[in-house]
Image (cartoon, helix red, strand yellow):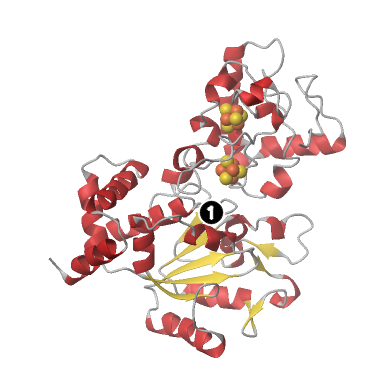
Amino acid sequence: MGKLQSDFRRELAARGVSRREFMGFCSAMAVAFGLPKGATAMIAEAIENNPKPTLVWLNYQDCAGNTESFLRASKPTAAEVILDLISIDYHEVIMAAAGHQAEANLRAVVENQKGKYIAVVEGSIPTGANGAYCTVGGRAAIDIAREVCGNAAATIAAGTCATFGGIPAASPNPTGALGVGDAVPGIKKLINLSACPMNAQNMTATLVYYLTYGDWPALDKLNRPLFAYGKSIHDACERRSHYNSGQFVEQWGDEAHREGQCLYKMGCKGPVTFQNCPNVGWNDNTSWPIACGHGCIGCAEPDFWDKMTPFYAHIPGFPGFGKGSNIDKVGFWATIGVTTAFAGHTLVHLGKKRMQSGKDTPADPNVNPKGGEA
Ligand code: SF4
Ligand code: SF4
């Protein structure tokens, strides 16, 4: 047994994670990547034997929610141990170093591990006022990001602010906030893990994929891993049979709501949002928003704060949706709607414009186009 492998096994044992739990974790990773069960042993071997990369984590215009998500675990898990073993040499929220020493640590990684380390960016990057809206150690965030991400093997944008600008970039975007890909064009490899916050499971799986294959997972056209963002919320939703059967919650707390029926009419944006929340859940897979009775607000999509609002108004313009429509067609048209939305999110955008101009005529007269805020 090599040193890395024995160190890793010792760490698992010290943290109370059994071999069975570790193999269970590797098996879950194989399933997440869509690999056959035989891949479990390969993933386990790679995690145990391959050197863990160095990672630096930059925080800009953000609420630290992605850091919270990354660190949050109710008990030591195999994932937690793996993340602990990755050498996080710079992270403003958790590092012990401060001031000049901290900045020297970051410089050392950029200079000594050029092209080898992984950069994670949390938060959007302001470009207005020559970068003066966000500075660290006297340097503009945009300048630091250009240098750190420009010299990294890969950059992971963690959360919707870092991927697409998020709330700081919402209209009128006073700081000129941009996601990493727009603020720092030409990055060698950009992986977007959108959502507000990013789901720690998806960060773990992305890093495990890299540890296993020495490469990054296949991405969609928004640079998001397909294993996590390849399907809409609607596709995997546990309430989908109610949608297909035309059984909808009409009011918060009504009988349909208590029975767990579809939240489409209450503003659910699951049909136009792509992420694996229904499968991996949140908080150690304790639950997820729709299971709790609240619709998806589309937090993993670009410009969600502008395009997915009002959150409690249903997506207008789903042809075939409404009273008297053939219920089979509801599901059929939803699929068409999802495809359309994925192609450019125009459905929601147009819908919002129509709602804002007051010209929208909802298919169902019982639906309030301005939304019934809970
Ligand atoms: S509209 Fe929302 S609640 Fe209804 S099935 Fe789709 S994702 Fe689930
Ligand atoms: S259900 Fe929708 S709003 Fe909630 S976390 Fe998932 S993508 Fe974001």
Res. 368 in view: yes
Q: Is residue 341 left or right of residue 237?
A: right
Relative placement, left or right, of 167 versus 233 is right
Relative to residue 364, is residue 281 depicted above or below? below
Q: Residue at x 55, y 90 (%)?
A: 100
228 or 99: which is nearer to us?
99
Q: How many marks are shown on the rendered structure?
A: 1
For label 1, the residue is 198
Residue, x 48% and y 62% (percent of image)? 71
Residue type at mark 1?
Answer: Met
**SS for callout 1:** loop
Query: Looking at the image, in which quadrant does ligand 2 appear?
Result: top right
Measuring from the top left, give residue 184's x and y in whole percent.
57, 68
Quarter assignment of residue 308: top right
State the residue at coordinates (55%, 75%): 92
Answer few, some or many: residues within 10 Å of disc 1's Cα (few below 14, many 20 plus, some between 14 and 19).
many
The outermost residue toward the right is 358
Coordinates of residue 26 in the picture (x, y in percent): 29, 49
Q: Nearer the viewer, residue 99 or 286?
A: 286
Q: Residue furthest bottom?
A: 100
Left or right relative to 327: residue 115: left
Left or right for 88, reference 62? left
Q: Where is residue 188? Give x, y as percent.
A: 45, 66
Is 99 situated above or below 4?
A: below
Q: Position of residue 345 (x, y in %)?
A: 64, 40
User: What quarter of the picture does the N terminus occupy?
Assistant: bottom left
